[in-house]
Each structure stands twice: as structure tokens, then as C-alpha cells.
Amino acid sequence: MNSEYVVRLDGEVDPEQVGVKTARLTELAREGVQVPEGFAVTAAAYREFVRDARLGPAIAQAIRRYRSGRDLIVAAAEIRSAFRDAPMSPVVADNILKAYAALGGEGADVAVRCSPVSAPDVGQEEVFLHLSTGEDVLAACRRCFASLYGAVAVGNREAEGIDHLAVAMPVTVQRMIRTDLGGSGNARGESTFVRVRASWGLGGPTADADQYSVHPGSRPMIVTHRGAKLTKTVYGDPCGTRVVRTTPEERSTLVLSDEDLHRLADWSVAADKHFRRPTTIDWAKDGCSGELSVIEVRPGVSPTMRIRAYGRSALVPQPIAD
């Protein structure tokens, strides 16, 4: 399936083509850490899309207007609008659809995420969840391409003197982990322990999450603190997400088993050793299969991320449903 425009996440990859976040995940997968099956839409695919849709002049014109005094937010929005209206390059679309078919094709749930190549391109990245048609996957890829022209990213490149026409935004497409039926959280090494946070559902504020301290050595030790876990985020019907109250059983039950915790601790240690620096892994537990997977590896604080499910923002305040 590998080509100039699409690369599977199970072998050697080039960070300049698949983005830093995706490259990290692929490296950990080679270390034996479980990562959701998927593929990367490469930087070359982005550039082919821009060339085929003739977006270069529109980008250059909007940037000139900004430098002449136009509001940055307006100029950036103009570029993103041009991206979203442009048809996907046929050759790129064909490669993406073939790769999606290899994951199960129409009806197979996937997540689509931005994977920036460099720090100045990190802004308000978009993540699209629970997509189940080829058309939706292509649309999400276009939206990820367009996110390269968020106001923050454009301002960062302007400040650093980076050519806007020389950058690219790879995209990651992976099988959907049903965390709405399971749980999610993060894990990070701290001294001789690994700290783990866990919540039911798609994640969100962790103030009332379960918290664990795990010693992954030859004499395993686990210290647990059960959080209140009063609410969780799940998929809405027919679109978006919603916050619901957890059940009494969920509030009284720990999200993770001892076996889960040992596995996450081992993965955290493996990540720290591999990248030779403290890292945080974001994990997800599928409520259908019970399987754990790592969905992101990040050294330090993660950027702001806009999550979308079925194309609707998940960060719009919504009432809690009983």
C-alpha cells in the first residue's frame, strides 16, 4: 500500500513526510507498543493537493494582503476557506481511498489527525473522530491540510521568516478506538514511578480522574486513588459529542486493571528509553475489545487540539445529559 502519498504505520518512516507525532508513534510500534492500525497521508500528498488545486496563488495573495495591513485572522480564514472548497487531487484521493479500504473501507470507523512537521506549524490542530465513509475521510484530510493556515501557525511562520509555500501538513488516519465505551488518559515517568491518569469515555478534564502510581520494576507496586469520575464525554446522536453523567457502577469502579497498569507503565518506560527524555503517552482503551493502545507520544505540553466527531466540534459547551 505504501506510495509517495500514503505510508503504513508499521515500518521505517520519514518524519519530514509523515510528521513528528506520527513518526514517534511508528517508532514505538517497532518497540512492541500497541498503536492503532493506520496510515499517513504524506507531505508529498499535501503538496500535490496544493499544486493540483492551484492554491499557491491564493495563499500568496492572502499573505501579501496581511503584510499590507489586513487582519491576520481574516487572511488566515480566507486561505482555509480556499482549501476546504478545493477538490482533492484525483491521484491523492485514489491513494487515500485505497488505504482506507485496507482498514475495512465504507463503514469502518477511523480517526483523522493532523501531524505537523515542525514547531511553527503547531497551532489549533484538528482531530476528526468516528468517520465511517471514504467521503468523510477525504473531507477531514482537506480540513487537516487547511489547519496549516490557522492564525497561530501563520503568525508563527511570519515571526520566524518561514516561507508559507514551502511548508506541508501530513495527516494520520487510524482505526477508531471506542473510548466512548471504554476509557482514556495519559501516563508519564516520574522518578522511579509511572503516573497514570484514567477517565471513562473520550477524555477531557482530569481533575476527578482515577490516578495511579505504578512501579514497573521486578517487584511491581501499584498505588491507586479512585477519582469521582462524575461525568464522561461520549459520541452524540446523530453527530458531535455530549457530556453525560457516569453510572454509579462507573463511579465506584477503577477504569484500569492491574494488568492494564503494568502494560502502560512498561510502555511509558519504553518511550522514555527510546526517546532518551521524559515523555507523556496518551492512551485509549477500547470498550468493545478491551485492548489498550497508545494514540500520542509527546515530550512536554501538548498543543491545543480541536476535536471533532462526525464533523462537529466537541469543545462547544453542551448540557450534561442524564
Image (spheres, rainbow, N blue to C red):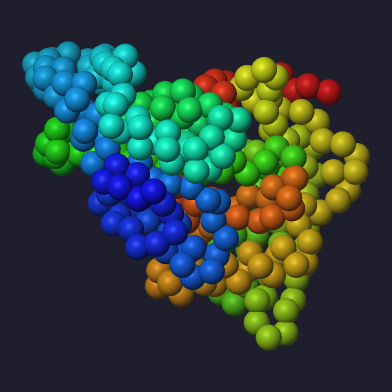
Residue 189 point in image, percent of width and height: 55, 68
Above or below: residue 98 compared with residue 80: below
Total of numbered circles in the picture? 0
- Residue at the image point whose x is 65% and y is 76% from the top: 216
Above or below: residue 274 compared with residue 254: below
Above or below: residue 117 compared with residue 84: below
Residue 142 point in image, percent of width and height: 36, 26
Residue 253 point in image, percent of width and height: 86, 51
The image quadrant that residue 238 belongs to is: top right
In the rendered view, does 21 fall on the left or right side of 314? left
Q: Quadrant of the C terminus?
A: top right
- Residue at the image point whose x is 35% and y is 63% from the top: 12
In the rendered view, does 3 fall on the left or right side of 179? left
Q: Nearer the viewer, residue 35 or 260?
A: 35
Q: Is residue 128 visible?
A: yes
In the rendered view, does 216 fall on the left or right side of 245? left
The image quadrant that residue 190 belongs to is: bottom right
In the rendered view, does 202 fall on the left or right side of 7? right
Q: Nearer the viewer, residue 250 or 130?
A: 130
Above or below: residue 243 compared with residue 301: above
Q: Is residue 19 visible?
A: no
- Residue at the image point whose x is 44% and y is 59% from the top: 10
